[in-house]
Image: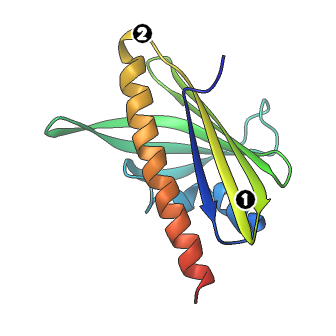
Amino acid sequence: MGPDFTLEREIHVPPSDVHAFLCDLRGYVPLHPFIESIEDLPGLPTLPGATVHRVVDRIPLGPFKLKTVYVAALEPRGDDEVRGHAWQSPGVRLHTRYGVTRAGGGTRLVERCFVDAPRGLRSFVVSQARKAHDETLDGLKALLEGRASR
């Protein structure tokens, strides 16, 4: 089964800069439209080398914002890949693969996101995740390219 969505960006900075950003969830806070706070957690034996966090999101739901709390992990897999994992109740799981490759004078970033969620929530979760991740990647591109132009 393929990803639920794939996003791509060409970012005019070295791949090492993109990879380093992807490995630090704290950098996502000003870019991700839902993240309110992040707290570091102890590592997981099932994901050695991954950083693990407790994340609080505020997800728009009509005129309201739904507070959700979940566990997220970022797992570097060499210089060209980072995997993201998120576990949220009730039974929502996101697994993300970020591929980082040299492209011309910069980096090609490809995100593939796989979603497991109860049938009644699945389309909502995929839609919200795609929107949030798309906005986050736009912010990541602007941030890293802005730093590089200074």
- Image spot of residue 120 (x, y percent): 36, 11
Which badge, 2 or 1, comes first in the chain's sequence? Answer: 1
- The part of the image, by quadrant, that contains residue 124 is top left
In the rendered image, the residue lying farthest to the front is: 104
Colour scheme of the rendered structure: rainbow
In the image, taking residue 105 as reference, residue 139 lies left or right, namely: left
In the image, taking residue 42 as reference, residue 70 lies left or right, namely: left
Report the residue marked by disc 2: 119
What amino acid does circle 2 point to?
Answer: Arg
Q: Which mark is residue 19?
A: 1
What amino acid does circle 1 point to?
Answer: His
**Vertical placement of 55 versus 142: above or below?**
above
Distance of mark 2 from mark 1, alpha carbons? Answer: 33 Å
Q: Considering the image in quadrants, where does the C terminus appear?
A: bottom right
In the rendered image, the residue lying farthest to the left is: 63
**Vertical placement of 27 versus 65: above or below?**
below
Label 2 sits on a secondary structure element that is: helix
Instruction: Give the residue drawn at x 66%, y 16%.
Output: 1
In the rendered image, the residue lying farthest to the bottom is: 150
Instruction: Give the residue drawn at x 72%, y 59%.
Output: 19
Label 1 sits on a secondary structure element that is: helix
The local crowd at label 2, few if under 14, some if 14 to 19, many if 20 or more residues have their Cα within 10 Å, is few
In the image, taking residue 121 as reference, residue 133 lies left or right, namely: right
Instruction: Give the residue drawn at x 55%, y 65%.
Output: 141
Instruction: Give the residue drawn at x 45%, y 22%.
Output: 89
**Vertical placement of 137 versus 104: above or below?**
above
